[in-house]
Image: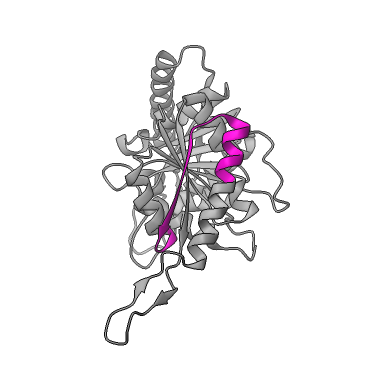
Amino acid sequence: MYRSILVPLDGSPFAEQALPVAVSIATASRAKLTIVRAWDPSNYRFSSELTPPFLDAEAHDRMVATEYLDAVGGRLRTTSGVAVSAAVIAGRPVDAIHECATNVAADLVVMTTHGLTGWSRAWLGSVADAVVRTVAIPVLLCRPTETAAPMPSPLFSRVVIALDGSPAAEEILPHAAELGRMGGASFTLVRVAPRVMMPVHPYTYAAPAWQIDQAAMEEAVSHAHDYLNATAESLKARYPGSTIAVDVRLDERPGMAIVDAVQDHKADLVALTTHARRGVRLVLGSVADKVLRGTDGAVLVLRPAGGSGTADA
């Protein structure tokens, strides 16, 4: 499924922890791997005071970035046998990643993000937010360890896929299934249904009181189970031999319910779509954001082709 995988790096050991995952995926799918690093074109020289500045091709930052990627690429070629190319692009990290993803026709981005760990190196945390809002391909966000040690396993054994019944949310299915298949993973399809409430009495002059509408709740849960079971059967037909379970959660907080499901099923990967709101809110969609910050494993995020996914209500 994947033919071109992009891994953004910033020169830190934490960012490099995404490489074993990316290499494993590239090996399983026979994809080419591109590592990219942005450099700040802040070094200028002038031919005279009357001409505008131009970039020094031998700027120190660019040389450092180039030498770093050459070393990483050489190491990967020697140890993995995967086809690896490197790109050093001038500009802001997000712009460089987007430009490189377009240039190499990337169909997957694999990168680390710190979430809210409080580490001093915040580059990849903020960039991950912006990358998801910018690219139209899935982004696999890996949580590095503070000791910069390699991740326990580069592939995934238990995958939770969050759905809400919408076509937008279902766009994550083939990507999550493909990544899980590579590691022989079992899958759990999760749907969160809010509790259905009804007023206790119809009197407008009395204080409002509410109770659970049991009949409506049972109908909603039954509908959610039917939807997940049908989706599971469709996945089994496409991936014979796959182990697929379903899980319906009753909660008004979809993000926290998905986090609980990930913990209960001991999943090492959770996959979902995100609307990735723009404007003043410079973070992932609300549900994806809560999942990323509430789980320890990897998160596969996709901004749907339509630009919004109701899984992040």
Please say if 154 is above or below 124: above
* Residue 309 visible in rendering: no
Q: Residue at x 41, y 50 (%)?
A: 132
* Residue 300 visible in rendering: yes
Q: Position of residue 287 (x, y in %)?
A: 46, 50
261 sits left or right of 313 in the view: right
Q: Does the magenta stretch include residue 14?
A: no
Residue lying farthest to the bottom in this orientation: 49
Residue lying farthest to the front in this orientation: 47
Q: Position of residue 87 (x, y in %)?
A: 44, 49
Q: Which residue is drawn at 27% across and 86% down?
A: 50
Q: Is residue 91 magenta?
A: yes
Depth order, front residue of 288/118:
118
243 sits left or right of 51 in the view: right
Q: What coloring was used for the rendering? A: one colour
Q: Which residue is drawn at 65% across and 62% down?
A: 119
Q: Position of residue 182 (x, y in %)?
A: 53, 24
Q: What stretch is highlighted in magenta?
A: 72-93
Depth order, front residue of 211/142:
142
Q: Quadrant of residue 297?
A: top right
Quadrant position of the N terminus in the picture: top left
Depth order, front residue of 59/286:
59
Q: Where is residue 62 in the image (x, y as percent from the top left)?
A: 48, 62
Depth order, front residue of 40/178:
40
Q: How many marks?
A: 0
